Image (cartoon, rainbow, N blue to C red):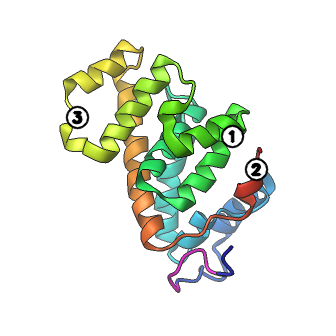
């Protein structure tokens, strides 16, 4: 366990004091989660960057979509597994455990989503996200059609691609800065 006091290996302390809107957002996190996720603290050295990050995250992960919140978290975990992003695997693995009510599913997705008991729709979605992560230049119409064949709309495909793209970016930043997951995530929903 790290004794690191900053959320990353970079010396970029949070703005102090936080603007009232940011403090309110952090207070909501504490109310709902019991803590402020370190990814938010990591971005809070620059409020404009934090606001851009949270706006994109909230739109992709919480806004109305043909993908359930669980499916979006599943994509986050599979992408993070391929990228071996410790922060996102811990944080989003906890979200999968919570949303699914199945701790085993969260662990399977972290280790190898192909061993998880997924339906054909979920398998197609995660296969697409995995290919996007490892070989995005090789995606072709047959890959999109495989999603359509499982009932995904073109809007859903857009959402799958954007969630996978966001986590590919976030994984790289988290890994490059040695972002530390909040200790609370480790024991959630076990």
Residue visible at 67% across and 48% down?
94
Are the two marked residues, 2 and 3, in contact with CB atoms closer than 8 angstroms?
Answer: no
What residue do we see at 66% from left, 77% from top? 2
Q: Residue at x 64, y 83 (%)?
A: 16
Q: How far separated are the C-alphas under marks 2 and 1?
A: 8 Å
Q: Residues within 10 Å of mark 2 (few under 14, many from 20)?
A: some
Residue interval drawn in magenta:
5-11
Q: Earlier in the sequence, mark 2 or mark 1?
A: 1
Query: Was residue 9 drawn as part of the magenta stretch in this picture?
Result: yes
- Left-right relation of 34 to 63: right
Residue topped by disc 2: 188
Q: Which residue is mark 1?
A: 97
Q: Closest to the observer: 69 or 83?
A: 83
How many neighbours does mark 1 have within 10 angstroms: few (below 14), some (14-19), or many (20 or more)? many
Position of the C terminus by quadrant? top right
**Residue 3 in view, yes or no:** yes
Disc 1 secondary structure class: helix
User: Which residue in the structure is indicated by mark 3?
Assistant: 139
């Amino acid at each position: 366990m790290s004794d690191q006091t900053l959320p990353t290996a970079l010396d970029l302390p949070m703005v102090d004091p936080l603007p009232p809107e940011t403090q309110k957002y952090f207070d909501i996190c504490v109310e709902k989660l019991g803590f402020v996720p370190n990814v938010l603290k990591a971005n809070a050295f620059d409020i404009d960057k934090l606001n851009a990050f949270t706006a994109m995250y909230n739109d992709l992960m919480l806004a109305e979509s043909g993908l359930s919140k669980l499916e979006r978290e599943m994509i986050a975990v599979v992408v993070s597994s391929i990228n071996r992003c410790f922060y996102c695997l811990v944080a989003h693995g906890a979200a999968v455990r919570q949303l699914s009510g199945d701790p085993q599913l969260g662990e399977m997705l972290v280790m190898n989503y192909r061993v998880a008991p997924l339906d054909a729709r979920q398998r197609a979605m995660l296969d697409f996200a995995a290919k996007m992560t490892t070989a995005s230049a090789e995606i072709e119409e047959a890959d999109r059609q495989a999603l359509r064949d499982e009932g995904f709309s073109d809007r859903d495909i857009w959402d799958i691609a954007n969630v996978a793209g966001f986590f590919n970016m976030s994984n790289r930043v988290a890994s490059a800065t040695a972002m530390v997951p909040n200790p609370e995530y480790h024991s959630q929903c076990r």
